[in-house]
Image (cartoon, grey):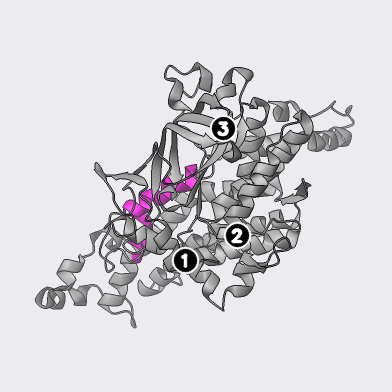
Amino acid sequence: MRTPEQYLASLRDGRRVIYRGEVVPDVTTHPHFSRSARHLTVDFRVAEDPAYRPVAIVDDSDSGVPISRYFHIPRTPNDLRDRSHLITESTRAAWSFVPLIKEIGTDALFALLIVTGEMDRQINTAFLPRVQAFYRRCRDSDLAMAVAQTDAKGDRSKRPSEQSQPDLYVRMVERRRDGIVVRGAKAHTTNAIFANEILVIPTRAMTEADADYAVAFAVPADTPGLTMVGSPRGFSATSEFDNPLSSRYSLTESLTIFDNVFVPAERVFLDGQWQFAGPLARTFVEFHRFTAASYKPPVLELLLGAAALAADANGIAGAAHVRDKLARLTMYLHTVTGLTSAAAASPRLREGIAVPDVVLTNVAKFQFARGYHDAVRDVQDIAGGLVVTGPSEEDWRVPSIRRLIEPYLQGRAGWDGEQRLRLMNLIRDLCASDLGGYLEVLAIHAEGSLETQKLTVLMDYDVGQAAAYAAQAAGLPAPAGKSAVARR
């Protein structure tokens, strides 16, 4: 197990990072990125905290030494439940900002262990031993990992091999005796800038014509030819008074560019086996959407708690419409948490690894994404216009101005002007700042859009079962095979 200091030291390796037009020599000291780097130590801090040790650490059955529970391969419903609990608690410790430096990487490792095992058995390849060796390296060195899955895509009506610019999906441009050379870019790569290893997997199913794009591999973050262009979106705040969350904690997305990057053979996990690109992409999201549903509750708790405090501060906690909104927010939170727990309780085994229930996982993610904007609206409605019209920290820190404005900011008895303003600043940061906009887009598109969850549910659940039940009740012949809607 590494300490937070050892993790930060590992990021000073000469990796090529671009931010606002400039090369960043050290992400741990950069004015913007150092905030993210410090925030992401949470997974290492939690592992050192005796209060979290039962959930964060597990004695590994293979090595016999304590390891981060993130690396523990789930075999049972209890394993999935404990993993979900760790993700939730780590996110809660970071005030609703999931670290995503071990969570997402192990999602991909579990998917690779499953799919390469199935592939080796079906078409006589030998990729599973490579994945197992890489998994052990990440586990035993307690590494931080990022997953680069989403390609630039270009014209989304066309397949990878049909694009006018061939590098819009990451592809293999040369195969050597000792490895492969890849080119292209992956978009929206979360926290790659702060990872030790970048895991690359396909974003979609492929055809034989797309075989060069059917690649999966891992490279260190300082690999020659690898460039990460960091996004500044969502976390521009610097004042803890005005923006109590986004000024202290942040995630960083990047455009991750591979410019003729050489990948040694032992780090290549898919090498033109196009039939398995789709299964690998789907298996990864089956784990990752479970991770997503596990890290969503803390932000929903913040929304609910902030709404309840705003109702109290504004003196409207007893109003019928407010109670209705608080009830909706409460049911929203418990719908997501309940579905996540149910998904952990009913896994399916593949290659001896427990995969969370696919339908319930996708329903949990869908319910979160579908309800997020409604939840933000309810919080904004309860809080009132002060969320966006309140005075700034600069006003508040000038004694003469503060004396002038403070009497007009107080709420009901017990809420002075500063208390109420600080609460409104929290709500603005969550619901009306650049962070708020980032979170709203993230709710829809992170871990796959709403439409991908619908498609996954229809692919995994045989709607024909319900159709057969209805046909029997109506005295009709049972439909043959899967329903038409499921086949589409």
Q: Which-is-in-front pick, marks 2 and 1?
A: 2
Q: Nearer the viewer, residue 287 or 130?
A: 130
x then y, percent, for residue 165: 42, 19
Can see residue 170?
no
Membership of 403 in magenta stretch: no
Say which of marks 3 and 1 sits in front.
Answer: 3
Q: Main secondary structure of the magenta part?
A: helix
- The percent coordinates of residue 133 (x first, y second) are 65, 48
Residue matched to label 3: 178
Badges 3 and 1: C-beta atoms under 8 Å apart?
no
In the image, which residues are magenta? 426-445
Q: Amino acid at mark 1?
A: Val
Instruction: List the residue tagged with mark 2.
Output: 140
Image mark count: 3
Q: Which quarter of the figure is the N terminus placed in?
A: bottom right
Q: Which residue is the site of mark 1?
A: 42
Q: Earlier in the sequence, mark 3 or mark 1?
A: 1
Instruction: Give whichever of 216, 154 is nearer the camera.
Output: 216
Q: Is residue 7 above or below residue 364?
A: below
Pick whichever, 181 or 354, lies toward us.
181
Q: Where does the image place residue 128, in percent across and percent down from the top left?
A: 70, 41
At 45% from the left and 20% from the top, the residue drawn is 166
Position in image of residue 162 (x %, y %)? 50, 16
Quadrant in the picture for residue 283: top right
